């Protein structure tokens, strides 16, 4: 689980010098409570980002950076970050659709894998604009927008 | 976001950016004169591949695809009136294609990234492998 806590605001500056203190300070107690709460409800209150969103963003950014010079579709799709995104399952469908809308990219195979559907007509194979349109139309039909 | 360090020969041979990044077309499309589709013989049938060419990541599949576009295997060199394509492969698996500009320079679409001018040797290395075939057709 991705937990992000702003120590600078959760505890006082002097707290950083007290790691070896046998008695937890009020600041560390507050941090501990915040972390426990985040883990319990799965929400990063600092940024309003769920662990699923944070994990997806991390993997998507990694995939984008590490495959940007690659033409091979199999090399793109078999990249560990892309496979990890697929492994996140249907929970990431809205995230993939948002990403597709924000900046067209090759999320088609991931969408196909997690939805079990393929709205792209064979006539539009490789036409990224039309592939994006097909998936966004599918999203609207399924109530994702 | 182009890191030439991944292409060791570019450091010595030089390169020039020619157009901005685009996820809409790739090196294969660019080499055969297309900039609206992503060409690849993927088994998922998601991407464009000329009908009549084997849909497999093999050199033979690329030979067939280029032939369907009028590009036939030929020798290296530069001839006015002949468009040449170079196919790069890593361990025998096609990875990249570039098209010739003149007797020294070639033009490549770098995946979803930028277009660059470079020497043929400039892109050889651990990412795209080596140039394994040259194709040509009358302009």
Image (cartoon, rainbow, N blue to C red):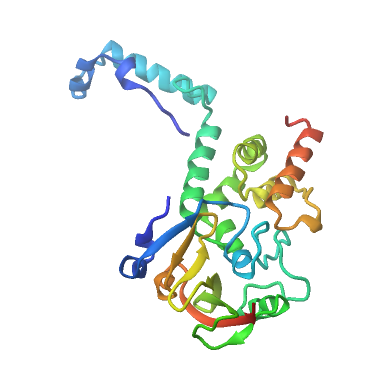
Compared across the picture, whether B122 is left or right of B27 comes to left
**Which residue is farthest bottom?**
B75
Query: x%, y% of residue B105?
Result: 45, 72
Quarter of image, res A20? top left
Please report the residue visible at 35 percent of the width from the left and 14 percent of the height from the top. Answer: A30
Please report the residue visible at 35 percent of the width from the left and 18 percent of the height from the top. Answer: A31
Compared across the picture, whether B26 is left or right of A58 comes to right
**Which residue is farthest front?**
B80
Query: x%, y% of residue B101?
Result: 51, 72
Using the image as rendered, state which of residue A145 and residue A20 is in the foreground.
A145
Q: Is residue A55 above or below residue A4?
A: below
Q: Is residue A17 above or below residue A102?
A: above
Compared across the picture, whether A117 is left or right of A62 comes to right
Query: x%, y% of residue A76?
Result: 56, 58
Using the image as rendered, state which of residue A92 and residue A21 is in the foreground.
A92
Quarter of image, res A12? top left
Give the total number of marks visible in the rendering.
Answer: 0
Rendered-image quadrant of the C terminus of chain B: bottom right
Using the image as rendered, state which of residue B133 and residue A97 is in the foreground.
B133
């Amino acid at each position: 689980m991705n937990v992000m806590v702003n120590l600078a605001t959760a505890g006082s500056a002097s707290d950083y010098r007290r790691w070896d203190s046998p008695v937890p300070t009020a600041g560390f107690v507050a941090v501990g409570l915040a972390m426990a709460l985040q883990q319990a409800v799965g929400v990063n209150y600092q940024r309003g980002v769920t662990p699923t969103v944070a994990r997806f963003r991390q993997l998507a950014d990694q995939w984008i950076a590490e495959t940007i010079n690659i033409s091979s579709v199999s090399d793109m799709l078999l990249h560990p970050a892309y496979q990890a995104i697929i492994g996140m399952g249907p929970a990431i469908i809205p995230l993939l659709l948002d990403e597709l809308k924000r900046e067209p990219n090759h999320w088609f195979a991931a969408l196909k894998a997690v939805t079990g559907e393929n709205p792209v007509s064979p006539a539009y194979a490789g036409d990224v604009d039309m592939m994006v349109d097909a998936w966004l139309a599918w999203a609207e039909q399924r109530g994702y927008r | 976001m182009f890191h030439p360090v991944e292409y060791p020969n570019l450091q010595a041979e030089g390169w020039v950016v020619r157009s901005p990044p685009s996820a809409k077309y790739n090196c294969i499309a660019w080499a055969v004169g297309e900039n609206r589709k992503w060409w690849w013989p993927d088994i998922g049938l998601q991407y464009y591949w000329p009908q009549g060419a084997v849909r497999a990541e093999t050199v033979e599949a690329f030979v067939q695809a280029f032939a369907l576009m009028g590009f036939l295997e030929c020798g290296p060199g530069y001839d006015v009136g002949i468009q040449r394509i170079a196919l790069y492969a890593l361990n025998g698996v096609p990875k990249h294609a570039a098209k010739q500009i003149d007797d020294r320079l070639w033009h490549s679409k770098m995946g979803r990234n930028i277009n660059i001018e470079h020497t043929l040797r400039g892109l050889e290395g651990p990412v795209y492998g080596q140039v394994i075939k040259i194709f040509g057709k009358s302009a």
